[in-house]
Amino acid sequence: MKEKILGKEFDKLIESLSKFPSIGEKTASRLALFLMKNPPNLTLEIAKSMVEARKKVKICNNCNSFVFEKKCFCNDPVRDSKILCVVENIFDMISIEESGEYKGQYYVLQGLLSVSKGIKPEDLKIDRLLKRVKKVKFNEIIFATDPTNDGEFTARFLNERVQKYCNKTSRIAIGMPLGSEVDYIDKNTLAKSLIDRRKL
Ligand SMILES: [Zn+2]
């Protein structure tokens, strides 16, 4: 019915926009409408920046992070190569960097395990992490996932699998409000959470 009124191109646009996380059909329709009522150049500009950014980004085989223009923390010789911090996403990694309390390596999960959302170990590149952990034999692995149900579950799951391949594992938690998210916490609180990390 809607297709008959709006035309298949508009319908396709709504369908495509609905593929973004947290964008339902209603929001997608509003975004589509926004593009239609603005000059065509705006749509071109948005589409171009999406394509350009996507083309430039690579995934690092070592830390599973997005790499722009070959800059990756893995290649920085002044960082401690024997300490690893496991984070959910690139924004958490940036927050930890900004806290100034950490100068080791990272592993970016690109998500969290979740029973409610049906995200299983095979959906995250956990094999890549385990391979690295077995090879490097880290002095310490810090789990810096959010103190939410999924964050705690992921940290516990990974800890069970990596513990025997490193000297020590730890968890940031103290000082972080329960249910909060790493990339929303202020720098000082995050820095304190890292300093006060507890041994697992
Ligand atoms: Zn890397």
Image (cartoon, helix red, strand yellow):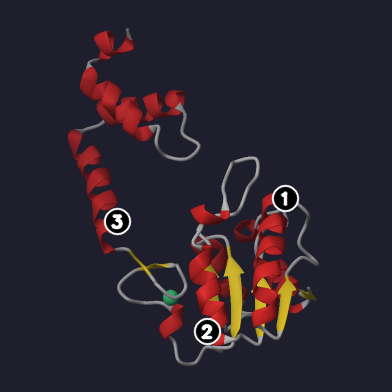
Q: Quadrant of residue 196?
A: bottom right
Q: Which residue is mark 3?
A: 54
Can you give x and y, in whole percent of width and height, for residue 192 in the image?
A: 74, 73
Number of the label disc, if any, that sits on residue 135: 2
Q: Which residue is mark 1?
A: 149
N-terminal-most mark, 2 or 3: 3
Tell me if residue 99 can be seen: yes
Q: Amino acid at mark 2?
A: Lys
Residue for point 47% across, 73% down: 63
In this picture, residue 145 sits left or right of residue 10? right
Q: Amino acid at mark 3?
A: Arg
Can you give x and y, in whole percent of width and height, for residue 26 in the image?
A: 45, 23
* Ligand 1 picture quarter: bottom left
Number of the label disc, if any, that sits on residue 169: none
Given residues 117 and 72, the one toward you in this image is 117
Q: Of helix, strand and loop, which one carries label 2?
A: helix
Q: Nearer the viewer, mark 1 or mark 3?
A: 1
Q: Nearer the viewer, mark 2 or mark 3?
A: 2
